[in-house]
Amino acid sequence: MHLRVRSQLSYQSQVNNQKRYFDAFVWSLKNSFIEYHGDAGKEELNTVCPTHTVTFLASPKFSYCGCDVEDGQFRLLFHPEKLGTNISHVGEKIAEALSTAPQPEGASTLSYAARHSIKTEYTTKIIPMLEKARTLLQNPKLEFQPGFEALGEKLKNGKDVRDDWETNLGDFARKYYESFIDVLEREKFGEDEMLREGLEEGVPKGVVQLKLVDTLKNGGYNETVLDDGALIIQVNLVDHVLKCFADAVAADYPRSMGNEHSLFLREAG
């Protein structure tokens, strides 16, 4: 473990302060980060910190202290005028530090926070939902394709995007598919063969995608369209950004989907 300390304090004071910061970091690492993120978190930490080194140095980056990753090293940083103040903060945002860390060549374009959200809030929960949709439509080959990489790229460059989108990306996407299933149930697709056949003809690929767009044909927060054999849930990025994810998914989207299932039949026919 390599330590670098810039301070005019006595050597013993420096050592004592270093120990307190490292103790706080280890506590947060064990009892907060690893407890919540598990093996995936440890793997990410080792990936972005291939030197397996933790450094300790002064920096004005944080008001009191914090952490980041630079040159493959995990850095514990303290404000040069606030040494010894709020030491417990030094390891509070390990996950955030990993999310902003430089990624190795060929890595996903999504941050660690976004990937963790997808894993915990989408991947582990979507399977029973997909099976339910397949049962309602009597289509065992139906697939949900949220396109997370494309969503992430759009959000990174979006206007006025809420700052917690990465930690909520998996949850947001899952909620759209929940609404899709709600509409299938409400409109009784499971009981109406004509509706099922119409949707199958209009969506021959059997794919339900999620896409962020700059403008919608009919305005509002979101809409459903048929394109290239897929059903696409389109969400307005401009102006509303992710407000639609959090607030309107349970209101606007189900109504629009319910109003448009006849459109699927007309387009299919």
Image (cartoon, rainbow, N blue to C red):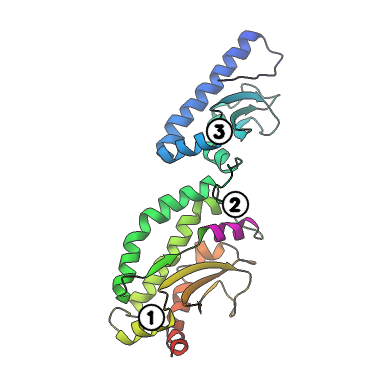
Q: Secondary structure at mark 3?
A: loop
Q: Residue at label 1?
A: 200
Q: Which-is-in-front pick, marks 2 and 1?
A: 1
Q: Are marks 2 and 3 in contact (CB under 8 Å)?
A: no
Looking at the image, which residue is at 57% across and 13% down? 16
Which residue is identified by label 3?
49
- Depth check: 102 or 107 in front? 107
The amino acid beneath tag 1 is: Glu
The vertical placement of 141 against 55, above or below, is below
Q: Amino acid at mark 2?
A: Asp
Mark closest to the chain's N terminus, 2 or 1: 2
Secondary structure under the numbered disc 2 in the rendered image: loop
Please check the rendered image and state whether residue 16 is part of the magenta-colored stretch, yes or no.
no
The magenta span reads: 149-157
Residue 74, image x and y in percent? 58, 30
Q: Residues within 10 Å of mark 2 (few under 14, many from 20)?
A: few
Residue that label 2 marks:
163
User: Which residue is the extreme one toward the front?
Assistant: 106
Viewer-proximal residue, 64 or 96? 96
Tell which tag, 2 or 3, sits nearer the viewer.
3
Q: CA distance from mark 1 to mark 3?
A: 48 Å
Q: Is residue 206 above or below residue 96?
A: below
